[in-house]
Amino acid sequence: MTVEYHPIKLDAPSSMSLRAFATKYSGELSKDDAKKLLKKNQEKMRKLQVRLHAEQKQSLLVVFQAMDTGGKDSTIEKVVGHLNPQGCAVHGFKKPTDEELAHDFLWRVHPHTPAAGQISIFNRSHYEDVLIVKVHQWAADRVIDQRYEQINQFENLLHSAGTRIVKIMLHISSEYQRERLIRRLEKPSKQWKFNPADLVEREHWDAYTSAYETMLSRCSTSMAPWYIVPAETRWYRNVIVSQILRDTLEEMDPQFPDANFDPDDYKIDSLS
């Protein structure tokens, strides 16, 4: 079974408007078929992860960004939660510590990029420093303007060292965010996720939209493309993200290394 999927891939700098892209989409795919395809993609990703780990030459970095309530946590859980944790790590980037603020903005990120044979998932990322920092003007405009090119150079460095980079923006509308915040507030099992500060950030929706558009325009490259994924139909979101990651790993095509011994020289039955 295959599916025609519709994330928007941005792999070159260009001006753009997020309002032009749908936030809710499911195409011709049914929910049942999507579940089957997600499982199929997960099984293939597991096999490719084993080969990636054995090969020890390439690595994969997956960056997730979204507005609050955009579904980063649930997407990561549903799509990559099945992978072997020995070879896949999830890192979240929240408010910088005093030690992190004493260094350049990429200092806290670089240690969490994947080693050869590994997969790293970023739940938020270095892009916070051109998003929330820009919206709240916590850095001078000239500093933020420099960061776009510094991020591109950083990602180019990772790419040249064998790291494949996939960046996924989970795209939602203001109306959807409002519904999710209400759900968090009204449902007891979701109240732990509610943060009054989210209401403050929601007041900056237009500023965040503008910051995202600039980020996408300035930091979409062939070596580290951005994908805009319609995220309001969650089962469709999950299968689309799984398809992007499966396709990426298949393009990387990791291979089992040749044995450095002759297997015929060893007989298990002869071992004491």
Image: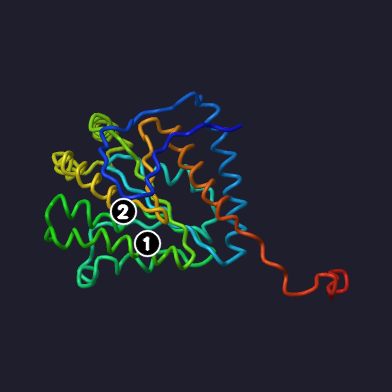
Secondary structure of residue under mark 2: loop
* Residue 15 or residue 201, whichever sits in front: 15
The residue at 27%/37% (across/down) is: 18
The residue at 24%/41% (across/down) is: 194
Q: Position of residue 26 (x, y in %)?
A: 43, 27
Q: Are marks 2 and 1 in contact (CB under 8 Å)?
A: yes
Residue flagged by tag 1: what amino acid is it? Glu
From the viewer's perspective, is 226 left or right of 35? left
Res. 190 image quadrant: top left
* Residue 19 or residue 268, whichever sits in front: 19
Res. 133 image quadrant: bottom left
Disc count in the image? Answer: 2
Q: Determine which of the numbered discs, if any, sits on residue 223 in the image.
A: none
Q: Position of residue 104 (x, y in %)?
A: 24, 70
Secondary structure of residue under mark 1: helix
Residue flagged by tag 2: what amino acid is it? Cys
| Mark 1, residue position | 155
The residue at 34%/56% (across/down) is: 92
The residue furthest right is 270
Q: Is residue 14 above or below residue 267?
A: above
Q: Is residue 63 above or below residue 262?
A: above
* Residue 263 or residue 197, whichever sits in front: 263
Q: Determine which of the numbered discs, if any, sits on residue 219 in the image.
A: 2
Q: Position of residue 174 (x, y in %)?
A: 23, 33
